[in-house]
Structure formats: structure tokens, C-alpha cells
Image: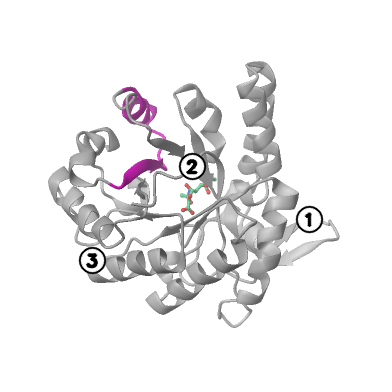
Amino acid sequence: MAFPKKKLQGLVAATITPMTENGEINFSVIGQYVDYLVKEQGVKNIFVNGTTGEGLSLSVSERRQVAEEWVTKGKDKLDQVIIHVGALSLKESQELAQHAAEIGADGIAVIAPFFLKPWTKDILINFLKEVAAAAPALPFYYYHIPALTGVKIRAEELLDGILDKIPTFQGLKFSDTDLLDFGQCVDQNRQQQFAFLFGVDEQLLSALVMGATGAVGSTYNYLGKKTNQMLEAFEQKDFSLALNYQFCIQRFINFVVKLENSKLKVSKNQRTLPLGTTNFPFLHREDCLSRRTLNY
Ligand SMILES: CC(=O)N[C@@H]([C@@H](O)[C@H](O)[C@H](O)CO)[C@@H](O)CC(=O)C(=O)O
């Protein structure tokens, strides 16, 4: 087995899938996007085809191409490229997992199937296990996002004994505000080297206190630098400074979530990265602000 490789930690940008105005994927900007993340935001890990990347609104063929382009363009520039391969169909998910391994991705992540839902932990674990087995040399992350999947099985419960079922399990991407569940995941798995990646950017500081080892989110595309400053202050135990950064980030997110999509405007900075319009169906407002054009 090629891993465990370097533990996934720090910030992971959930990438936006660039689109042309007519809804085709704009592969041509991905190289520029990689440079922008590394140089302007100090972010060297990415999470591709997730919620922000609208992975579940893309065809399997598009998902494969997007994954491939990010891996190719990120080579020798990014630390880790994690591909989200979750799908309603187990076979599609396995195909994407296998493909991620073939192209040299650094890990795969999977959400719970969300139409015909697993109603027990064992059913969910069995689904995840089958996907993980399709890429046995790749680190596997469970992507917990109950508000969107509707699958409310607690992550803490899921993690109990997970290595017996999924030996490639490396960590949890936790996109929920239940800090009891998150804290218990950390507390009950202290002897493991799991990555605990928090996914609610506006509450990251609370999750750091609870033991988060990193974070995956949409805002690290444009607030990566600021959030890295918060991580640094936290590391230095300057909690008051860290809180100031978190409040600053919250003010921005709070402002954006209050905006109506139709009124969104991008900032006046001169250098931009064109990302086009969103795919259908439409995503979150804060991501819409950032995706039209990443300004820096
Ligand atoms: C529901 C949702 O999209 N949550 C975002 C957050 O980054 C979110 O945009 C941020 O906290 C602002 O609310 C991430 O957890 C999603 C994510 O990591 C992904 O795109 O895969």
C-alpha cells in the first residue's frame, strides 16, 4: 500500500468547477486556479467535485475529466488532491474511485447516498466499504454533511470500529455544526492518526479547540490567507487574535449570506480568475459570489 502518506492537515479548498457561459466546463483556467490558490491564498490542498464543485450535478465523464485536470495541473504545486467520488450508484462511485487511483490522486472522499438512504450505520459502512475497496491504495475520507444528504447517522457512531471495515480509512470531513458529535469523534479516536477536517468555515475556531486537524471549505478559495492567519494565531496560542480573525471571517460570510443572488457583485480588484456561472441546480449564495470571478 502506498500510504499512509503525509497526513492531510491545514486548509483544503473545496474547488469551484469553472464553467463557460454556456455551461461547459472551462478546463482552461484550472492551471491558473492552482497558481492562484498556492500563491495568493497559501492553500496547497484541494477537494475536487464536492459540494462547492457541484460534483453531483456533473456527469461521470465530466467528473473524471475535472479530477484529471486538477491532478495534472496540481502536480508538483499542490500537496494533496482529494477527489470526492460519492454518487447514488455504487458502481459509479467505484468507477470514480478507481479512476482517482489511476490518475494519481492523493485520496478519495464519499458522502452517504441521499435518495434511497442507508438507515443504519452498518448499511452505510457497507456502502462506503465497497467504494473504498475499488481504490485499495488510496486514503479514504468519509464526508459527513447531514444537512444536504439527510443521512443523520452520527459520525461518532460511524467511526466506531471503522478500520475493521475500511482499512484505508484516513479521516473525516465533518460539515455539520454538531460539536458534540465532532468532539466525540476526536475524543474516541485519539489513538488513531485520523485527520479531522471541519467543514463549517465560519465556526472553524470552535472546531480547532475541539481538536480539528484541518478544514475543508469553499471560503478557503478566497479567505485562505485570512484563515491561515487564524490557524497561525491558534497555533501560537494567541486566542484573542485568532478570535479576531474568526470574527472578521464571520462578518464576511454573514454579509454574503444576506445578499440576494441577483444583487451579487464582485469586488473591484484588478486581477481576476474567471469561473463562469454555476451549474444547474443552483448552489449557495456565498459560493456564487466567489465563483463568478475569484478576485485577488
Ligand atoms: C454546505 C456547504 O457548502 N458547506 C461548505 C462550507 O465551506 C460553507 O460554504 C462555508 O462554511 C460557508 O457557509 C463546505 O463544507 C462544503 C465542502 O467542503 C465541499 O464543497 O465539498
* Residue 132 on the magenta span: no
At 61% from the left and 49% from the top, the residue drawn is 44
Task: Mark 3 vs mark 1: give the one in front.
Answer: 3
Disc 3 from disc 1: Cα separation: 42 Å
Task: Kindly identify the amino acid type of the residue bearing the numbered disc 1.
Answer: Ser
**Mark 1 lies on residue:** 267
| Whole-percent x, y for residue 101 in the image | 39, 63
Task: Mark 2 vs mark 3: give the one in front.
Answer: 2
Number of residues whose C-alpha sits closer than 10 Å to that of mark 3, classed few (under 14), some (14–19) or many (20 or more): some
Q: Look at the numbered discs 3 and 1 and tell me whether their residues touch, using CB distance below 8 Å.
A: no
Residue 24 image-quadrant placement: bottom right
Label 2 within 8 A of ligand 1 by Cβ? no
Q: Earlier in the sequence, mark 1 or mark 2?
A: 2
Task: Kindly identify the amino acid type of the residue bearing the numbered disc 3.
Answer: Leu
**Mark 3 lies on residue:** 90
At 48% from the left and 32% from the top, the residue drawn is 213
| Numbered range of the magenta stretch | 168-187
Task: Mark 1 vs mark 2: give the one in front.
Answer: 2
Q: Earlier in the sequence, mark 2 or mark 3?
A: 2
Task: Kindly identify the amino acid type of the residue bearing the numbered disc 2.
Answer: Lys
